[in-house]
Image (spheres, rainbow, N blue to C red):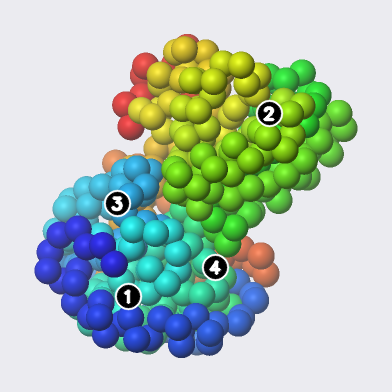
Amino acid sequence: MNVFSPSARRVGALTATALVFGSLAACSSQSTKPAKAGSAPASVNSSGAIKKGQTVYFIPKDTQNPYEVLADKGGEAALKELGGKVVVSSGTAATAAAQIPSIQAAIQAKASAIVIAANDPKALCPSLNQAAKTGIKIVAFDSDISCGNAPEHLFINQADTKRIGTSQVDLLAKQINNTGEIAILSAAASATNQNAWIGYMKEQLKKYPKMKLVTTVYGNDDPATSLTVLKGVLSAYPNLKGIISPTTVGISTAAQYLSTHKEVKVTLTGLGLPSQMKAYIKDGTVESFELWDPSKLGYLAGYAAASLASGITSVKAGATFKAGTLGSYTVLAGDAQNSPSVVLGPPTVFNKANIDKFNF
């Protein structure tokens, strides 16, 4: 477990380690439909104001991912505005087992809320249920959990899930003239967001019958692993025309490789950080890619968590809350496939014409 700051981040980590495997084995629910079970009774804040002095645990996929670091900083900015604080805690590997000690630390610290980017949709459920029963509010961002009736939680969606998936296929199709073999370089095979986007990519590919998805490989948001599987794909499919990497680690790793191996004529797109991809846009390795501002995603999640913990909003469809400089947001209804959520906004496409305007 890697810990970033205040000593509270370390509290309970060792105790929690003993609970990891039991928690992993106990979770088996399939539905994401929200319910009250497993959550502490909601208190009513008659003043309608955010409570001061809140501590919100931000648990990213791992502490090494630049995207997650930016998102966490957004959460820290939100809680600072609200008179509270953020504790960032997670492991150095993007696994559920590495995240569970941080959940236990939040429980022991009597945190107001947990904001988590799930490495696995189900394995975290028992620990998050345990947290919810103590009154801790649960918010998922970046990658959602799927825990059935409990815990009650809100998902902060970076953009419309379908649009993220389909737009990446459209970007690649335009660049390879709608023709050829393509591959997907994803993050962890269990990542909820990645799998949802890939599902919509496959649907969108039906509109491009001359494009063929030959394989999907997983780099686990680790540069070394991403490079290894990338090389494997390039070796196995010599006629490959394009790669979609819907992860900032994967696309930056692939871009770095392709920039130094110009003999490999493969078109690359996906989701990337402008700060990491600028050089590859300017040298022509990558024509375009897309993303939203992860710091704004974390900022929105911070406001949502503090509002839920203050009892001035809920996960009920139509509930509203204010998110500082981002304005007001309304909770969208959940269903059998999706949790109650709010959507940050549409992704931005980055290319030579605009890449210099962004510095995150």
Upstream in sequence: badge 1 or badge 2: 1
Quadrant in the picture for the C terminus: top left
Identify the residue at horizontal 63%, vertical 41% (top origin).
232
Upstream in sequence: badge 2 or badge 3: 3
Which mark identifies residue 72?
Answer: 3
User: Quadrant of residue 332 in the image?
Assistant: bottom right
User: Quadrant of residue 320 in the image?
Assistant: bottom left
The crowding category of the residue bearing disc 1, from other C-alpha atoms within 10 Å (few below 14, some 14 to 19, many at least 20), is many
Q: CA distance from mark 1 to mark 2?
A: 39 Å
Upstream in sequence: badge 1 or badge 4: 1
Query: Is 130 above or below relative to 80?
Result: below
Identify the residue at horizontal 81%, vertical 24% (top origin).
179
Identify the residue at horizontal 42%, vertical 72% (top origin).
97
Q: CA distance from mark 3 to mark 4?
A: 20 Å
Identify the residue at horizontal 37%, vertical 47% (top origin).
65
Q: Which residue has dot 1 on it?
A: 101
Query: Do we see residue 1 in this rendering?
Result: yes
The crowding category of the residue bearing disc 4, from other C-alpha atoms within 10 Å (few below 14, some 14 to 19, many at least 20), is many
Upstream in sequence: badge 1 or badge 3: 3
Q: Nearer the viewer, mark 4 or mark 2?
A: 2
Upstream in sequence: badge 4 or badge 2: 4
